[in-house]
Structure formats: structure tokens, C-alpha cells
Image (tube, rainbow, N blue to C red):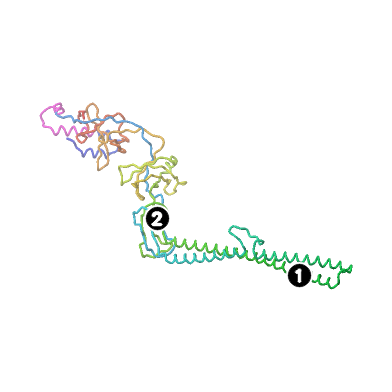
Amino acid sequence: MKDHSLWSWLSKISRAHQCVVGLALACALLVTISCGRTGSGSAGVQAAELKPVRVATSVATSREVAVSISSSGTFMAEEVSELAPLAAGRVVATPVDVGAWVNQGDIVARLDDRDARLRLEQAEAAQEQAQAALAQSRMRIGLGPNATFDPAVVPEVQVAKAAYESAEAQAKLAAADAKRYASLVATGDVSASNYERERTQAESAQAQADAARRQYEAAVNFARLNHQGVGSAEAASASARSQVAMSRKELDDTVVRAPFAGYVSERHMSVGESVNSSSKIATILRANPIRLNLQVSEMDAARIHTGMTVVARTAARPESEFTGKVTVLSPAIDPSSRAMTIRAEFANPSLELRPGMSATVRVLLPQGEQGIFVPASAVLTDSGSNASRVFVIENGTARVRVVQAGVTENGTTRIVSGLGREAIVAASNLPDLYDGAPVERGN
């Protein structure tokens, strides 16, 4: 008595003709019923022979739902790094493999470091020599650590100064004696020969004082020259330290480390291969949080702002919804597609979302709208045409309604169009129903 091919045909026609087709279908069903009966008996007796279909019923409810902008997008890793060595060499170890988790600073690969170690040892030896030469230069002028240079504290300068001061004192004394003897010669108290002897001694003492002064000045100049040597020794020591730092960096560059925590998605080199600074060793990506890039039309672009909620579904996990936030809006509209690119960020601690996954996306807008909801069991969907229908119970009779079904969640399906709120719909035994079928409400 039920012609399911008619239902399939009904689901494919436009909504504008649904009512007309529904009436025609009801007439066709009545003709089928009357033709399938034996010739004896009246029409009332035939109707009495139709047994009511016992169905559970439910009332279509209305509640506010979020208004959203639909799109599609692709998940991308938050960070992706193609690791390359900073030094050339031969790979001697690759302690991680594809899929391994690495923390920031973990070793991804090692290169042969023997030459780098030898250069570091040479640089350290040169640094020790430079430091020893610096220490000798400081000691030579009596310059301690963090001390300011003063020529007067240099031992050689102090000795020369003492000799000069002593000679100067002797010269002054001899000059005073010669002056005194000159007065005595004038009065005749001493002879001219004694005066000449004293004068000669005074001149000799003055010459010795001048020589001591010159030696003192030479000692000061030599101390200053040695101080300049300390500056040269300090520069040589600094150069040696720099060479050690460079050699140590060259040694460190033979170890390739993870720049951030993440997963090894690719490993491009194996032990024994030679690499240089342009060679890729491995690829590391961070997928928590994970980014979603999507495009929205030029018309919808003005309605989207950062911070809005984004709901995504993936083909790999169709039963799950993932919630994120809009973080970046492109400052321009693509002139070729007339679309704006936006970026959303999703927390991904369990890594259910993976880079490269496609997703259907809804950007939830602040304002809402009223939606009609019925139990999922009240909706019949044709697998071939993907058309949906429900049966509305009116005065004990099932009436078919072709509807546009929306998202199904928690056993409830949203009806986008084709059904009003508070309509009573059949929620069980739908395959036994047809338009005009008598029904009996029950469990």
C-alpha cells in the first residue's frame, strides 16, 4: 500500500510545488488502495479495514540559536621550522625519528665535531698565553686588578725618584757651601784654593742631580710605555677570548637542536650523509594551539571581528565540534576571489586536530534567531536525493511535510524550513506511514 518511489520523486521536486504534489500523491494512494481491494463492499467498509499505525509523537519546539557565517578552511601548524645545520659536516647521529616529540633544546642531529674540538683547544691555549702575557705586563708596572695606572707607584720610578731627590739635596748643600766659601774668600778667611774646591764640588753635585733627574724622567716614560704594553696585552687577551668563543660556537653548531617544543614531522637526513648550511635536517611543527585559515565573502567580512567564536567540524571526527576564536583578520580583500582571509586559533592539547585537515566552519555572530527542532527519529532522509520529510499528525491522520533539515545534535534535528513550531510530528514507525495514513498515538 505504500509506494516509496513516490516519496523519492516527491523529495526531488521544488518546494513551490510540494502542496500540489502532496494532494496528487494522496489521490494516487487512495486509487491504489481502492484498486487493491476486491470488488465487493462499499468504500466505508474499505476505510474501516485500514488499521491505524501506532506512533510516538513529539511537539516541534522553538528556541534561539546562534546565527553563523559558514565557510571551509584548512588547519595549519602554529609554528613550522625547517632545521638546517649552522656548520658543514657529516651526520653522525639522529636521535629522533618522525613522529617523536621534542622539547625546546633537545638534540635532533649531531655532526662530526673532531675538527671543531681541535680548533677550540688551540684557541684555549692561545688564550692562556695571552692572559699570562697580560699578567706579566701588569706586574712590570705594579698594576693590580681593577687598579688605575699611576707612574709614581712603579718600583723603578720610585727608585729613580729617590736617587734624584738625594742628588738634588746633595747639590743644594754643595751649592750652599760654595756660596759660603765665596764670602769667606772676600774677607780673607779662607784661601782661594779651598773656595775653588767647594765650587767644583757644588758643580759636580749639580751635574749628578741633573743626571738623576733625567734617569727619573726616563723611568717615568718607560713606565708609561709599559702601560701601553698592558693595553696591547689586554687587546691580545680579548682577541684570544673572542677566538675561544668563536671556536666554542663552531663546536656547538655541530649539534642541531629543536628551536621549540613540537613534533618531528619529517627527517631529511640519515647518519653518514654530508650536509651544509643549506641542507634540511628535519621539520618540526607545533600544533597546540593550532591555526585555522579560512575565507569569507566580501559581504560577510564586515560582520566578523577578532574574538568571535568559531566552530569547526572535520571529516576525520564528524561527530565532534571544535571551538576556537578569531585571532587575525586580513587587512585587504582578495580582488580575484572577493574574499577575506581570517585566522582562528584552537586549543589542541590532545592533538585531535592535525595540520592539513580540512574543516567546515561556522563563525558565530553575536545576534541569534529562532530555530525549529524535532527529535532526530522524526525525520526521514532519502539516501539518494538527500531530501528529508516529516509526518505531521492532524486529527489522527499523518500528513507528509517535505522539510529542509539542518544540523543534528544530541538526538535533535533542526528544521530550517517546511515546518512550524508546536506542530505534532510522528517520532516512531515512520517507514509504515504515508500521507493520509490513520495513526494512533502511543509510545
Compared across the picture, whether 222 is left or right of 312 comes to right
At a point 45% along the width and 67% down the height, the residue shown is 118
Q: Quadrant of residue 147?
A: bottom right
Report the label total: 2
207 on left or right of 47: right
In the rendered image, the vertical position of residue 346 relative to residue 206, given as above or below: above
Q: Residue at x 31, y 38 (%)?
A: 407
Pointer 1 residue: 207
Is 414 contained in the magenta span? Answer: no
Which numbered dot is residue 106? 2
Count residues near mark 1 (Cα–Cα under 10 Å), then give few for <14, some for 14-19, many for 20+: some
Camera-side residue of 367 and 321: 321
The percent coordinates of residue 1 (x first, y second) are: 17, 35
Q: Please provide the residue range marked out in magenta.
A: 23-48
Q: Toward the viewer: 389 or 68?
A: 68
Question: Which element is circle 2 on?
Answer: loop
Amino acid type, residue under disc 2 in the picture: Asp
Within 10 Å of disc 2 (Cα), the crowding (few <14, some 14-19, many 20+) is some
Q: Quadrant of residue 166?
A: bottom right
Closer to the eye: label 1 or 2:
1
- 320 up-or-down from 270: above or below: above
Q: State the image coordinates of residue 275 (x, y, percent, origin top left).
A: 40, 64
> In the rendered view of the protein, which quadrant contains the C terminus?
top left
Q: Disc 1 on helix, strand or loop?
A: helix
Residue at far right of view: 187
Give the residue at the far bottom of this rendering: 193
Q: CA distance from mark 1 to mark 2?
A: 78 Å
**Residue 47 on the magenta span:** yes
